[in-house]
Image (cartoon, helix red, strand yellow):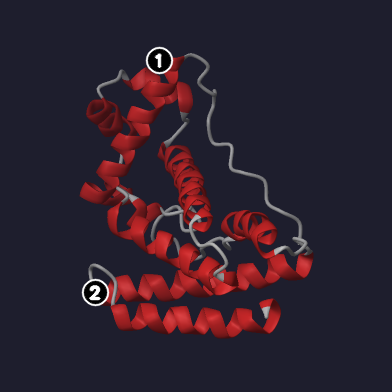
Amino acid sequence: MKPVPPATSLRRAPVQRRSAERLTRILDACADLLDEVGYDALSTRAVALRAGVPIGSVYRFFGNKRAMADALAQRNLERYTERVTERLRGTGEGGWRAAVDAVLDEYLAMKRTAPGFTLVDFGNQIPVGSRYAEPNHRVADRLTDLLSGYLDRAPDEDLRRTFLVAVETADTLVHLAFRVAPEGDEKIIEETRELLRAYLARVLD
């Protein structure tokens, strides 16, 4: 199972600071509108209006709203990785269970606070509501590379497959928790945590 490369949904990468700031405003507007109107009603024109930029600026970066949502998902993954990395610096000698707690807790925190995250998260279900979601390869590969160093273990194919199963399981159960309760049903979340620990113990203990 080879690592999946990052999504490249930008038509043109920003070079100047002003261009990068404009891209940030566009993605922020996209995230806010996802929460307000949903994916189906999202439009590039509405994003341009919310971001305060000409519609041509949106099309300079993105060909359509799918590409824009993909870029938001990639930004979410980058921010999530940064949060987990920072959290791991403070776990000390907590072992892999502390690392798994960090991974799950930061995902839950973004689910509760990051604009647009409840619909798009890391992009495996774009377009939102599609019947067949893509596997969480990007997330699993990123976590494998991140945690393998922390766990002092080579990021081999077996570990990547293990993390893919863990990520898919957590993704499904966390979505269930947030369907049951707006902030995530705590009992389902704790069941998820225990299930992950039991599964990963076979490989990581």
Using the image as rendered, state which of residue 88 and residue 29 is in the foreground: 88
In the shown orientation, is residue 85 left or right of residue 2? left
Where's residue 16, x and y in %? Answer: 48, 14
Instruction: Return the residue at label 1.
Output: 18
Quadrant of the frame with the N terminus: bottom right
Quadrant of the frame with the C terminus: bottom right
For the residue labelled by badge 1, is the local secondary structure a helix, a strand or a loop? Answer: helix
In the shown orientation, is residue 14 left or right of residue 105? right
Where's residue 5, x and y in %? Answer: 67, 46
Vertical order, 39 against 155 (above or below): above
Q: Earlier in the sequence, mark 1 or mark 2?
A: 1
Using the image as rendered, state which of residue 75 and residue 39 is in the foreground: 75
- Please rate how many residues cluster around mark 2, counting C-alpha atoms within 10 Å: few if below 14, some from 14 to 19, many from 20: few
Q: Amino acid at mark 1?
A: Arg
The image quarter containing residue 172 is: bottom left
Instruction: Return the residue at label 2.
Output: 181
